Image (tube, rainbow, N blue to C red):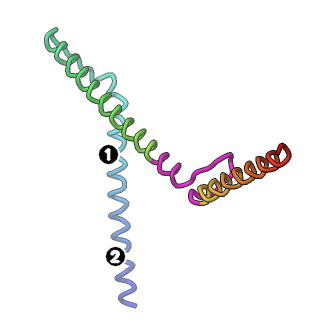
Amino acid sequence: MLRFRQYQRAEAKLGGAVTTISKKVDTINQHIDKVLENAPTKLKVSVQVNDADWQKIQELFAKERQWMTAQMQMHIREVNSMFADERKKVHERYKEYDGCYLGHYAQWFFWFFFTIGVFVIAGGVGMIIAQSCG
């Protein structure tokens, strides 16, 4: 029972400390909010730059923009090259003719016997013509 009361006292002290800290944080946040509300009217900065410095700033900006453009173009070229390589690999892996999917080797097998069949039929037709004429 004694430990339970000690725990309750410690919990009450901790709760009080949390409440105190919370109030202080709220006060700080209110002050920050007030400062931010007044900042646009109170903080005015003007900068004067002579023409030579302004020209240097413009040149540095132009160089930076040129470098950034070159980097982006290089990355775009790399990505396009990667896409082209992948497209070639996929085309080699899966050759498709007339929307009919056949594996690469199956296609060569088909075309081999197709051409043999065409020559056999052409030869048979030639023999029939030769027999009828001769």
For the C terminus, the image quarter is top right
Q: Element at badge 1? A: helix
The image's mark for residue 45 is none
| Left or right: 62, with 109 as reference point | left
Q: Amino acid at mark 2?
A: Ala
**Quarter where residue 77 is shown:** top left
Residue at image coords 27%, 20%: 44
* Mark 2 / mark 1, whichever is N-terminal: 2
Q: Which residue is mark 1?
A: 28
Outermost residue toward the front in this view: 134
107 part of magenta stretch: no
| Left or right: 132, with 30 as reference point | right
Frontmost of labels 2 and 1 is 1
Q: CA distance from mark 2 to mark 1?
A: 27 Å
Q: Is residue 86 above or below residue 33?
A: below
**Quarter where residue 80 is shown:** top left
| Left or right: 132, with 71 as reference point | right
State the count of labels: 2
Q: Amino acid at mark 1?
A: Ile
Outermost residue toward the right in this view: 132
Mark 1: give few (<14), some (14-19) or many (20+) Cα within 10 Å.
Answer: few
Front-lying residue, 7 or 127: 127
Q: Position of residue 93 (x, y in %)?
A: 52, 55
Q: In this picture, which residue range is highlighted in magenta?
A: 86-105
Front-lying residue, 117 or 83: 117
Residue at image coords 37%, 74%: 11
For the N terminus, the image quarter is bottom left
Q: Is residue 17 above or below residue 107?
A: below
Q: Which residue is mark 2?
A: 10
Front-lying residue, 50 or 91: 91
Residue at image coords 36%, 65%: 16
